[in-house]
Image (spheres, rainbow, N blue to C red):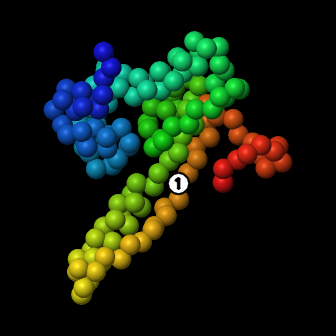
Amino acid sequence: MKNTIKDAAKKTNVSITTVYRVSNKSKDVSAKTCKHILSIIKELSYFLFVIASGLKICLSKGISVSDEVSIVGFDDSYILPYIIPRLTTIKQRREEMGKVAAELLLNRMSSQNKKKKTLRQIIIPVELIERESAIFFSSNEGGDRLE
């Protein structure tokens, strides 16, 4: 059976949002709740399912992760450094995202013209956490690299 975030939330008797916060190292969940949720996540092997599926497919096809194919995750979950090979990931600045969202909401609420909608594009930089699951090229080595 494939466990999901819903299964973890149901088993721990908390919301899906709370499980998500714990899995992403949010500081707004009590230590006791974090410990309980992490033990259930470990029991259910929730995070490992998707990662393990990709790695299993590569292994079954004789494909070497990082030598022939790169696997990159997103959100830098607490467990990613412990997967073998350690999973390269993109880390978002969630606290900054929340701050910007709150500022935009407060500005919108205090605006004189509440019906006027001003569209904006706000880019919050992310960080690439380089681990063993991806091949990296320096600019001198050639190849296509997204910057």
Q: Return the x and y of residue 92 as percentages of the image width and height.
A: 47, 51
Q: Is residue 100 above or below residue 134?
A: below
Residue found 61% across the figure and 14% down from its top = 61
Residue shown at 54% from the left, 40% from the top: 89
Residue 86 placement, left or right of 23: right
Image coordinates of residue 58 in percent, x first then y, are 58, 19
Total label count? 1
Q: Classify mark 1: residues with Cα within 10 Å, few (<14), some (14-19) or many (20+).
A: few
Screen quadrant of the N terminus: top left
Closest to the observer, 107 or 115 = 115
Q: Is residue 39 visible?
A: no
Counting from the top left corner in percent of width and height, residue 117 is at 31, 76
Q: In this rendering, is residue 22 above or below 86?
A: below
Q: Is residue 96 above or below residue 7?
A: below
Displayed quadrant of residue 68: top right
The residue at 30%/23% (across/down) is 3
Q: Closer to the camera, 2 or 91?
A: 2
- Quadrant in the picture for residue 55: top right
What residue is disc 1 on?
126
Q: Residue at x 45, y 43 (%)?
A: 75
43, 103: nearer the viewer: 103
Q: List x then y, in percent, for residue 19.
A: 28, 38
Residue farthest to the bottom? Answer: 112
Q: Amino acid at mark 1?
A: Val
Query: Of helix, strand and loop, which one carries label 1?
Result: loop
The image quadrant of residue 100 is bottom left
The quarter of the picture where the C terminus appears is: bottom right
Q: Is residue 59 visible?
A: yes
